[in-house]
Image (cartoon, rainbow, N blue to C red):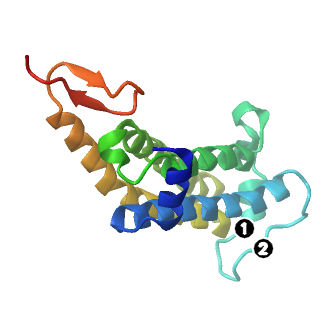
């Protein structure tokens, strides 16, 4: 598919698969928006993270903790921004029929979303057990991750089914775009 046709199909393509992919990109961007605000705090560009007026919420404590700076001596929100950018790119990548033409893309996206979900779960558990405080900003990121996890399943399933049904010796279409069975001699 030419880049021009790809652009048209991404902007104007219809169907449940494209709607899910757009929703995954939107959820990743929502997570990045939340992480962007946290990064502003972690880097000293803003002095305070607002919290809902509910007991147990203390975003400053959560995002100012030593754990938030422990990986690569970098604020974890900055690392999260890069991570969710990769998730958004994988959701946006490829033509609408990529589950059959490039099944590795939806499978890579599913693996990346599984990583995101594990990381969000680990950080939420840390907030509850170690920090003993919650952050609405983290909850927004975790919610977006949960939504993405639900959305990724149908396309990943279709890609896996496609690969399972392509048994035997494989060849590509010459551009490396897809694996299809070679015709029998």
The answer to which of marks 2 and 1 sits earlier in the sequence is 2
Depth check: 8 or 49 in front? 8
Residue 17 appearing in the image: yes
Q: Where's residue 121, x and y in %?
A: 49, 52
Q: Where's residue 12, x and y in %?
A: 49, 67
Depth check: 17 or 183 in front? 183
Q: Where's residue 98, x and y in %?
A: 37, 46
Q: Nearer the viewer, mark 2 or mark 1?
A: 2
- Residue at the image position 33 percent from the left and 41 percent from the top: 101
Residue 73 vertical placement versus 117 (above, below): above
Residue at the extreme bottom: 53
Determine the image quadrant of residue 179: top left
User: In the rendered image, which quarter contains the C terminus?
Assistant: top left
Depth check: 4 or 171 in front? 4
- Residue wearing tag 1: 58
Give SS at disc 2.
Answer: loop
The disc at residue 50 is 2
- Residue at the image position 20 percent from the left and 43 percent from the top: 161
Apparent side of residue 30 relative to residue 153 in the rendered image (left or right): right
Q: Residues within 10 Å of mark 1 (few under 14, many from 20)?
A: many
């Amino acid at each position: 598919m030419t880049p021009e046709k790809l652009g048209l199909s991404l902007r104007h393509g219809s169907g449940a698969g494209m709607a899910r992919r757009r929703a995954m990109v939107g959820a990743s961007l929502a997570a990045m928006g939340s992480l962007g605000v946290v990064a502003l705090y972690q880097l000293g560009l803003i002095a305070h993270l607002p919290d809902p007026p509910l007991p147990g919420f203390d975003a400053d404590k959560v995002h100012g903790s030593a754990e938030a700076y422990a990986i690569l001596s970098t604020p974890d929100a900055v690392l999260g921004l890069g991570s969710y950018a990769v998730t958004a790119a994988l959701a946006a990548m490829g033509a609408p029929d990529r589950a059959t033409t490039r099944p590795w893309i939806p499978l890579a996206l599913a693996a990346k979303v599984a990583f995101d979900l594990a990381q969000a779960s680990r950080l939420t558990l840390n907030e509850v057990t170690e920090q003993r405080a919650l952050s609405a900003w983290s909850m927004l990121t975790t919610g977006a991750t949960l939504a993405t996890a639900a959305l990724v399943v149908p396309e990943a399933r279709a890609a896996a089914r496609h690969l399972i049904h392509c048994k035997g010796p494989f060849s590509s279409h010459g551009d490396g775009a897809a694996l299809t069975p070679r015709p029998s001699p």
